[in-house]
Image (tube, coloured by chain):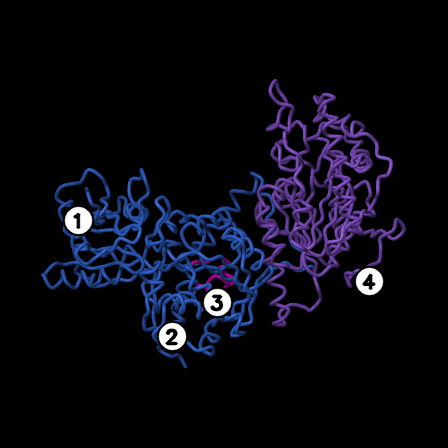
């Protein structure tokens, strides 16, 4: 068991931190599930943190100079490299502490990126930082496509989804590949803590972020982040989709603690995937055959996950 | 007290980094830079310097890591070369405007294709406009001294800019030379601790690297350019104090036998030593030739260069880089701009030589001077000539 978890006090609805470290007034779209997840993550992390952020929606909406939403130290260098920037900050603080040039107090270092930054362009940088064992948390805010550039497919875009670079047509049905298993890739680095989260389960999300920050060494959190603009879904339904995605087993919630898979929420009576797919324009074109295929793969993936949780 | 030793130039440069009491080194190996990072890994492993060596997964990761480290307030060093320098290119443009005083040793090497591990300046010239202060060392002593100077200038609060020291791959990096290594006390006397004005600190949160909307972008770019130009004063002051303490005076450009010269060779880096030998040979034959060597490449020392050119009639400018389809090589272009419509300006001829490790010999320099004289009488078709290329 991870010893840092002994001192961990769970967030409850009653003891939610009041302070907003991400100030309102930013430029996120209506119903943005990503900025909501980010706000919760920041509440969980608290003030004693340094945030390294990739280029992307969250970066541009929070820092149009001379304004900033950030009440904690925040740095953006480029698109693919927040994990490397975090490596540099972590290494710097380690040596500066040793040399007595900064206070001894621990500071949480968090790198964040979208799904494109994380699963495509920045995967090597993340792999490097996880492998080197830096004491930091990587948070992937996954809205399942390159939304900041206008909804292009990434390797985290789900099967069948329409994006501007995976358009359905006479010879295509949208995204032809299955979503990349980023949490699994993080687990393969033998890091102490990996988890998935959804903003519909906000206490679960916050507790996981806090645990990730507490753990010594690298931690990885993959957060499902609804994007009404990119998905063609109603802004007021973002939380509903964030719930449905879990209830249909499309995005299961789990932790991997020192290699042991722990289901956060077992879905014993799953809703059909169709309930999740409908109401999102990106899936509108899918026929029954494709939906049946999605259902079949979702079932298989979920069963595999359950087996992993029983094995470990 | 300083001591004079026979030492490989890469190791001497790495020793300077160690003596600077560096905090973080993030680097990825590439020939011919490897000896620098190997030595730094060793001195960290042996506890000779209390630093973190981050063995990053790529050069892009190295420069990204350096940005984070510098923003956190650590004295930060990296080194790269050629393809590696180009892999970090995207990030090289960022610490300048963000005012992060990273120091880097660039071990100059040719670019692919065809792949070549040998020396020229195509790598650094392709990164000319990254907005760093850039110096070029001629020999081992300079490589050592300029590295210490780089930390001092880059981290000076009036500057706060990244700075690179260029050394030629193999022909300088891998040779053993006599170098006077300064003692720790001497270095401490010259180089104050790094005290950044801003750093990532939860007690004083700041936002670094925000979006530059059209209303502020131009101002940000101009502010960076102004800072780079203004660094000149601190660069000179850094060299003057170095001379006061240790007796070695460095200048933005150096001249050799230039006083009454009609033709001046213009060089950068280690080939300058061969050029001086060539000048001695030509002087013996009664030719009025001399040399200008550019040490400070960015910010370009225009006034110093014009003064150094004096009353020379011709400049034979040597570039170690062939920019395909361009009017001239990068140094040639720079000097043509500098002297454009200046009354009494020398005629400028550009020679591209020493690509991918091709030796630039004494005879080649003599050939350049002869050609410059000939071109002064009869204007050539092109503004540059590539020297020493086999036709068959």
- On screen, residue B114 versus residue B272, left or right, reads right
Question: Which contiguous range is marked in magenta?
Answer: B150-164
Is B302 left or right of B279, judged from the image as shown? right
What's the CA distance linking mark 3 and mark 1? 44 Å
Residue placed under numbered mark 3 in the picture = B40
Q: Which residue is mark 2?
A: B244
Q: Secondary structure at mark 2?
A: helix
Q: Please, which residue is most extreme toward the bottom here?
A: B1
Determine the chain carrying the residue at label 3: B
Q: Can you give x and y, in whole percent of width and height, for residue B312 in the image?
A: 19, 54
Viewer-proximal residue among A129 and B108: A129
Do callouts 3 and 1 point to residues on the same chain?
A: yes
In the rendered image, which quarter contains the N terminus of chain A? bottom right
Q: Which chain is blue?
A: B
Task: Kindly check if marks 3 and 4 are in contact, taking CB atoms under 8 A apart as contact.
Answer: no
Residue ID for mark 4: A6
């Amino acid at each position: 068991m991870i010893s840092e978890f002994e001192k961990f006090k769970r967030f409850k609805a009653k003891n939610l931190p009041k302070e907003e470290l991400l100030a309102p007034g930013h430029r996120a779209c209506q119903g943005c599930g990503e900025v909501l997840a980010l706000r919760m993550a920041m509440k969980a992390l608290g003030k004693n943190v340094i945030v390294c952020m990739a280029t992307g929606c969250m970066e541009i909406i929070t820092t149009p100079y001379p304004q900033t939403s950030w009440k904690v130290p925040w740095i953006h260098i480029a698109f693919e490299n927040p994990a490397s920037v975090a490596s540099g900050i972590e290494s710097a603080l380690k040596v500066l502490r040793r040399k007595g040039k900064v206070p001894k107090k621990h500071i949480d270092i968090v790198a964040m990126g979208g799904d494109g930054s994380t699963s495509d362009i920045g995967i090597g940088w993340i792999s490097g930082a996880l492998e080197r064992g830096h004491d930091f948390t990587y948070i992937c805010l996954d809205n399942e496509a390159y939304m900041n550039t206008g909804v292009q497919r990434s390797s985290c875009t789900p099967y069948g989804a329409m994006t501007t670079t995976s358009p359905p047509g006479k010879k295509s049905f949208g995204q032809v590949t299955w979503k990349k298993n980023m949490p699994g890739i993080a687990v393969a680095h033998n890091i102490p803590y990996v988890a998935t989260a959804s903003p519909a389960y906000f206490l679960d999300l916050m507790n996981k972020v806090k645990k990730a920050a507490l753990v010594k060494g690298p931690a990885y959190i993959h957060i499902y982040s609804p994007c009404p603009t990119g998905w063609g879904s109603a802004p007021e339904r973002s939380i509903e989709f964030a719930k449905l995605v879990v209830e249909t087993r499309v995005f299961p919630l789990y932790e991997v603690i020192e290699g042991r898979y722990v289901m956060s929420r077992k879905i014993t009576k799953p809703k059909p995937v169709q309930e999740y797919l409908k109401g999102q324009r990106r899936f509108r074109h899918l026929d029954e055959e494709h939906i049946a295929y999605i259902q079949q793969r979702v079932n298989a993936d979920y069963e595999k996950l359950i087996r992993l949780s029983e094995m470990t | 007290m300083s001591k004079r030793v026979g030492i490989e130039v890469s190791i001497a440069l790495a020793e300077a980094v160690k003596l600077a009491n560096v905090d973080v080194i993030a680097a990825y190996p590439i020939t011919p830079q490897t000896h620098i990072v190997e030595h730094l890994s060793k001195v960290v492993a042996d506890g000779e310097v209390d630093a973190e060596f981050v063995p990053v997964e790529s050069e892009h990761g190295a420069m990204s890591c350096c940005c984070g480290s510098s923003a956190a307030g650590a004295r930060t060093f990296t080194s790269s070369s050629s393809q590696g320098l180009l892999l970090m290119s995207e990030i090289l443009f960022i610490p300048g405007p963000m005012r992060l005083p990273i120091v880097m040793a660039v071990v100059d090497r040719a670019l692919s294709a065809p792949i070549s591990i040998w020396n020229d300046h195509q790598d650094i010239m392709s990164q000319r406009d990254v907005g760093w202060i850039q110096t070029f060392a001629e020999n081992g002593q300079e490589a050592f001294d300029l590295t210490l100077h780089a930390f001092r200038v880059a981290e000076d609060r009036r500057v706060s800019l990244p700075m690179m020291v260029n050394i030629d791959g193999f022909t300088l990096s891998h040779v053993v030379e006599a170098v006077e290594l300064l003692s720790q006390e001497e270095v401490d006397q010259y180089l104050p601790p790094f005290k950044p004005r801003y750093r990532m600190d939860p007690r004083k949160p700041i936002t670094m690297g925000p979006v530059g909307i059209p209303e502020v972008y131009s101002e940000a770019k101009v502010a960076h350019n102004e800072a780079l130009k203004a660094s000149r004063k601190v660069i000179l002051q850094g060299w003057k104090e170095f001379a006061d303490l240790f007796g070695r005076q460095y200048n933005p450009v150096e001249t050799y036998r230039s006083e009454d010269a009609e033709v001046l060779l213009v060089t950068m880096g280690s080939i300058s030593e061969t050029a001086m030998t060539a000048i001695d040979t030509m002087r013996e034959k009664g030719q009025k030739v001399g040399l200008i060597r550019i040490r400070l490449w960015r910010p370009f020392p225009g006034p110093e260069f014009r003064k150094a050119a004096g009353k020379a009639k011709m400049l034979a400018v040597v570039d170690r880089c062939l920019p395909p389809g361009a009017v001239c090589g990068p140094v040639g272009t720079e000097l043509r701009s500098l002297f454009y419509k200046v009354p009494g300006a020398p005629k400028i001829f550009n020679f591209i030589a020493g690509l991918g490790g091709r030796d630039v010999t004494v005879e080649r320099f003599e050939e350049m001077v002869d050609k410059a004289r000939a071109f002064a009488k009869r204007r050539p078709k092109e503004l540059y000539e590539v020297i020493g290329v086999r036709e068959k």
